[in-house]
């Protein structure tokens, strides 16, 4: 770790933070080992932020909301990190860099740090890189970590498994939209925030809020917190302060119920088991004997000469 300025990271130096994240994202084994050394060293300095996951349907104004929310938090004396998770196709590309340019004002602030996560995966894929980047941001003194996920899909479950509070942004007039959202995503949500509640859409947003409130009351998923439904307008900075007030309420209720640390401990434990499974799979796929045998077994399974279970048992016997 002689080449890395650990003290600079702990003092909030942006260059040191960016270099540490680059090591985390690197595919080189030597860089990954150095990144793990850095993470071990900073671990006592992590865990002091509130981690918020934010998702939403296309066109909901996620970037506008995050910028308005981030700027409001900076006004409250907070330092804000925005980490964007994009599971999109490497062929089609993602919208993260576009999101970053749309957060132009926020990205210019010294109190803010915006970092896209590359979508191509190695061990653990984007989820591991985002988790580790989040720890580095906490060590660098960021008080609020916003983890943005693009689209509605598997990434939502990954992000919900690494944050303290999971927020879903919605559009006004979403009666049909409510049906279109996977029930699992709704069950993950600690809050629904209806954005663009301004002008002609204000009354529609209020009506939508009532619909969602009725639906969310059926999906209460913690012992101390009933998911809330709020309206806001990121463009006009309406109710952005109320959204933060809701998050503060959640934070103190979770602390009072001793649920905050318990949730993070459970997330860390689940993440360890997930990494164990992925490391085992990686080691298995790199085993020379397995590599030599797999084509023969695949052919046998395709021809129904051997069952898939028996083929798997033969592969495992080599390890």
Image (cartoon, grey):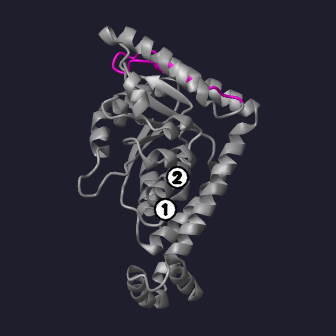
Q: Give the range drawn in magenta.
A: 224-240
The answer to whether residue 98 is above or below residue 171 is below
Q: Mark 2 near mark 1, Cβ–Cβ under 8 Å? A: yes
Q: Which residue is drawn at 48% across and 54% down?
A: 127
> Dot 1: what SS?
loop
Q: Quadrant of the C terminus?
A: bottom right
Give the quarter of the image for residue 296: bottom left
Near mark 1 (Cα within 10 A), the count class, few <14, some 14-19 or many ≥20, is some
Residue 206 in the image, given as x and y percentages of width and height: 44, 12
Residue at far left of view: 92
Numbered mark located on residue 124 in the image: 1
Q: In this view, does 9 lie to the left or right of 90?
A: right
Residue furthest front in the image: 304
Relative to 68, residue 222 above or below: below
Where 180 sits versus 154, above or below? Answer: above
For label 2, count other residues whose C-alpha is less than 10 Å away and answer few (under 14), some (14-19) or many (20+): some
Task: Name the residue located 54 percent from the left edge and 78 percent from the top edge.
Answer: 309
Q: Main secondary structure of the magenta part?
A: loop
Establish if 161 lies above or below 195.
below
Is 253 part of what is drawn in magenta?
A: no
Q: Residue 131 carries which label?
A: 2
Q: What kind of element bears circle 2?
A: helix
Residue 1 visible in the shown view: no
Task: For residue 106, say whether it is visible.
Answer: yes
Q: Is residue 108 left or right of residue 163?
A: left
C-alpha distance separating marks 2 and 1: 10 Å
């Amino acid at each position: 770790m002689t080449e890395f300025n650990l003290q600079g990271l702990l003092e909030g130096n942006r260059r040191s933070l960016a270099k540490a994240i680059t090591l985390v994202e690197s595919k080189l084994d030597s860089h990954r080992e150095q990144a793990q050394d850095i993470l071990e060293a900073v671990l006592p300095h992590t865990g002091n932020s509130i981690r918020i996951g934010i998702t939403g349907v296309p066109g909901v104004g996620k970037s506008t909301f995050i910028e308005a929310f981030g700027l409001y938090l900076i006004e409250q004396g907070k330092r804000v990190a925005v980490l964007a998770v994009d599971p999109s196709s490497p062929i089609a590309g993602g919208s993260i860099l576009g999101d970053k340019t749309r957060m132009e004002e926020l990205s210019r602030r010294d109190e803010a740090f915006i970092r896209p996560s590359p979508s191509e995966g190695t061990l653990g894929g984007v989820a591991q890189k985002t988790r580790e980047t989040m720890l580095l941001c906490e060590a660098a003194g960021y008080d609020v970590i916003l983890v943005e996920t693009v689209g509605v899909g598997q990434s939502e479950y990954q992000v919900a498994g690494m944050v303290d509070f999971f927020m879903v942004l919605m559009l006004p007039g979403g009666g049909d939209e409510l049906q279109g959202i996977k029930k699992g995503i709704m069950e993950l949500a600690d809050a629904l925030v209806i954005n663009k509640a301004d002008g002609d859409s204000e009354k529609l947003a209020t009506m939508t809020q009532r619909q969602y409130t009725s639906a969310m009351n059926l999906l209460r998923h913690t012992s101390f917190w009933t998911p809330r439904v709020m309206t806001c307008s990121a463009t006009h900075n309406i109710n952005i302060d109320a959204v933060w007030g809701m998050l503060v309420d959640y934070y103190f209720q979770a602390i009072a119920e001793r649920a905050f640390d318990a949730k993070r401990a459970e997330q860390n434990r689940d993440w360890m088991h997930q990494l164990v499974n992925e490391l085992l799979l990686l080691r298995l796929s790199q085993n020379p004997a397995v590599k030599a045998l797999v084509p023969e077994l695949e052919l046998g399974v395709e021809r129904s000469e051997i069952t898939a279970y028996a083929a798997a048992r033969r592969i495992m016997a080599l390890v």
